[in-house]
Amino acid sequence: MNCEFECDLSDPPSGTTSFDFDWDSGIVFPDTLKGVVRDPAEDDQRSQRISTKKAVQEIVDTPMILACQKLFDKNIKTHESGGNVNNVYVSIAVKERIRGKEHQYLSTENINILENLSKNKNLLPDGWEVNSPEDATDDNGTLTVAITLKEREKAPKQISDEACQIVNKLKLQQLRWGHESFKEMFNACHLREDAWEKRGGIQSDEWKITRERLEKYGSYLDDERQLVFPSEEIYENFLRGEKVKNCEF
């Protein structure tokens, strides 16, 4: 199953980076242009969890917003991105080790697509590269694959269109990130691996209090599957992904 998206912009998407030049023909990289370089204080946004598609606009540099939103819709986890004087890229999380447990985020089909793109640059717009999943970068326990623009003299809209062209080749997959079981969440909140069993699990008053706090801050709880999602939007993406057949990881 493949999700294709249109990427025809008459105006730039709104985001934290504002460009003081023409979206269609302005050059993104000269240092004299306002709004191209982030304030260093904004680097903290890199570690923020993205729980809605709209939140992408608040964190990602403007030229890469649409591409990152498309990856979000395909249930593909982005690790970092940039669209400024320093770099233009998006890194996709393949797998991550959390609390001693390995989590696989990217489907076998999408790994194979990225591998093919890394070996066949003729499938990419000029100036773009995809590094091989076999050579994934280890970023503090997260293995990532980067889609990078090496050609610097391109207009923001062209960058956006070409990034969209690349990520459109990837497929909708099952959601393997952004949610935890009730048990995992409860144990993490109480800093004990046996808290769920010791304190009565779903019937305990402590779970009811934990649940109220989660819902207060926008989490969505699926009682049937006993899963906690950061938002209802990610839960809806999870349901779409569950319809994908033969999705191997």
Image (cartoon, rainbow, N blue to C red):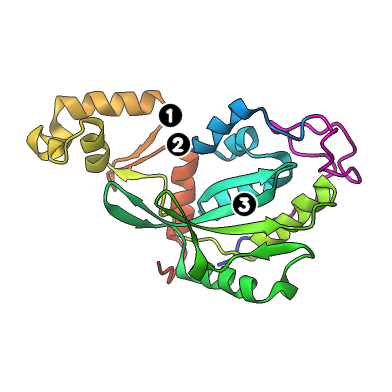
Q: Gap between marks 3 and 2, in whole Å? A: 23 Å
Q: Secondary structure at mark 1?
A: loop
- Residue 59's x, y, as percent? 61, 35
Badge number at residue 108: none
Sequence order check: which comes first, mark 2 or mark 1? 1
Q: Residue furthest left?
A: 198
Residue at image position (61%, 46%) is: 81
- Most foreground residue, 24 or 38: 38
1 lies above or below 186: below
Task: Return the disc, 3 or 2, that comes first in the chain's sequence.
Answer: 3
Residue 226 location in percent, x, y? Answer: 27, 44
SS at mark 3 in the image:
strand
Q: Nearer the viewer, mark 3 or mark 2?
A: 3
* Residue labelled with disc 1: 218
The amino acid at mark 1 is Gly
The magenta stretch spans which residues?
Answer: 6-34
